[in-house]
Image: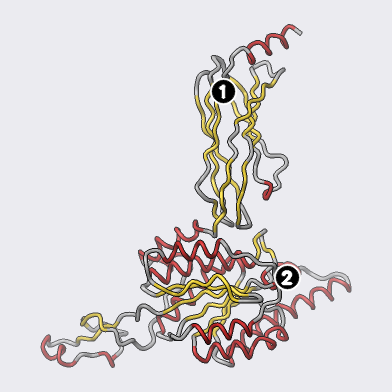
Amino acid sequence: MAFVVLDILILFFAKRGINASRILPEKLSNGDLNPIQIEIENYYTFPIYIRIIDEIPEQFQLRDFKIDRKIQASSSSKFQYELRPVERGEYHFGKLNVYVSSVFGLIARRFSFNDAAMVPTYPSFIQLRKYNLLAISNNLHQYGIKKIRRIGHTMEFEQIKDYVLGDDLRTINWKATAKANQIMVNQFQDEKSQPVYSVIDKGRVMKMPFEGLTLLDYAINAALVISNVALKKQDKAGILSFSKRVENIVVAERRTSQMNLIMENLYNINTDFFESDFGRLYGDVKRNLTQRSLILLYTNFETLDSLFRQLPYLKGIAKNHLLVVIFFKNTELNALISNKAETIQQVYDKVIAEKFAFEKRLIVNELKKYGIYSILTTPEDLTIDTINKYLEIKARGLL
């Protein structure tokens, strides 16, 4: 009893035992680990043991969050934890609760700091920054992005240079060769200011979650990155989304405020996951996109039947534009396919899983018949594979 009374006195005698604050970023990056910092100042003249219980936004559903630390007398300390949001929107933080105990550990005094705050969660700007630096330095291949050998050339002249093995013989500049007494070739650069549109299907086929993140949010994150890469490559970037109707339209432009406009529209994409109307998309594209553009269509097809229903509209879009259909592998089926089947039910499940995986490859071949490019990718590799395809199209001068 004496130690309990002593513990109460030394903890509650000071009116202001500690001070704590939570340092939040301006916004959270969807699908990435975001650091949250906590600063604690100890005004006690003895070491204390603290337990931090932060009121984290309800979207995370963390019921057992706590941080236990020791802080020396009359000192301050910083702690950090990470949160990974998996949906866009507003995240509301509540109070910051700190329980303080002395060396006796018999009593804990609670300090509550009203650090309530709201932080919006935007599409993954952490990925955007990573690929932004790589695009500027032309080192995108370091992250698995392929270098594509150029086929043919455009008509935008850049310079005359010495011939090296592998240069196209058709680009030899005979006048410059005669003057320099060695073979000289014309070098051409990629055409610029070409429209690149990210078209995001926000219908029910995009509701499927992988690693907690829906296919729609994977597509939104990839659209943000590819728009930035296109702008760095001197092209025009734009976006639009569709389900029952076409919305969130950002006309392809190349201006300083374009990325902010694209990010805000991607952040505000909302959907009830209705059935997607590809006919409405075809009509809007035909009516509004008058210049030949690269259209990156993020959608998902599980069976050939689902593709055949939309194929007439895809062929219509591909007549006037360079269309790339991007859809997803079902990674949840991989474990089912790789596991050894031991019962009749497991054999049946494995065969069905292999059938679905095979149909995905058939969809790629079916699109190829009609000159429609496609990307069949896993959700986690979506950004890399999309940039690969964009660079390949630019290198081959297809647009």
Q: In this view, does 241 lie to the left or right of 58?
A: left
Residue 397 placement: quadrant? bottom left
Question: Does label 2 or label 1 sit earlier along the sequence?
Answer: 1
Which label number is shown at residue 252? none
Q: Where is residue 259 in the image (x, y as percent from the top left)?
A: 44, 64
Q: Position of residue 308 (x, y in %)?
A: 69, 88
Amino acid type shown at disc 2: Leu
Task: Between label 2 and label 1, give the one nearer the viewer.
Answer: 1
Q: Nearer the viewer, residue 319 or 120?
A: 120
Q: Which of 392 and 214 is in front in this view?
A: 214
Which label number is shown at residue 333? 2
Q: Nearer the viewer, residue 232 or 246?
A: 246
Q: Which residue lies furthest to the top in this view?
A: 2
Q: Where is residue 197 in the image (x, y as percent from the top left)?
A: 49, 76
- Where disc 1 sits, the SS reads strand
- Where disc 2 sits, the SS reads helix
Q: Mark 1 points at which residue?
A: 18
Q: Is residue 113 left or right of residue 350?
A: left
Relative to 207, say whether 85 is above or below: above
Q: Residue furthest right?
A: 344
Q: Nearer the viewer, residue 374 or 112?
A: 112
Q: Position of residue 194 (x, y in %)?
A: 40, 80
Q: Is residue 352 left or right of residue 392?
A: right
Residue 15 placement: quadrant? top right
Find the distance from the CA under tag 2 to the CA under tag 1. Answer: 52 Å
The residue that appears at 12% across and 85% down in the rendered structure is 180
The residue that appears at 71% across and 78% down in the rendered structure is 302
Q: In this view, does 104 lie to the left or right of 165?
A: right
The residue that appears at 61% across and 53% down in the rendered structure is 85
Amino acid type shown at disc 1: Ile
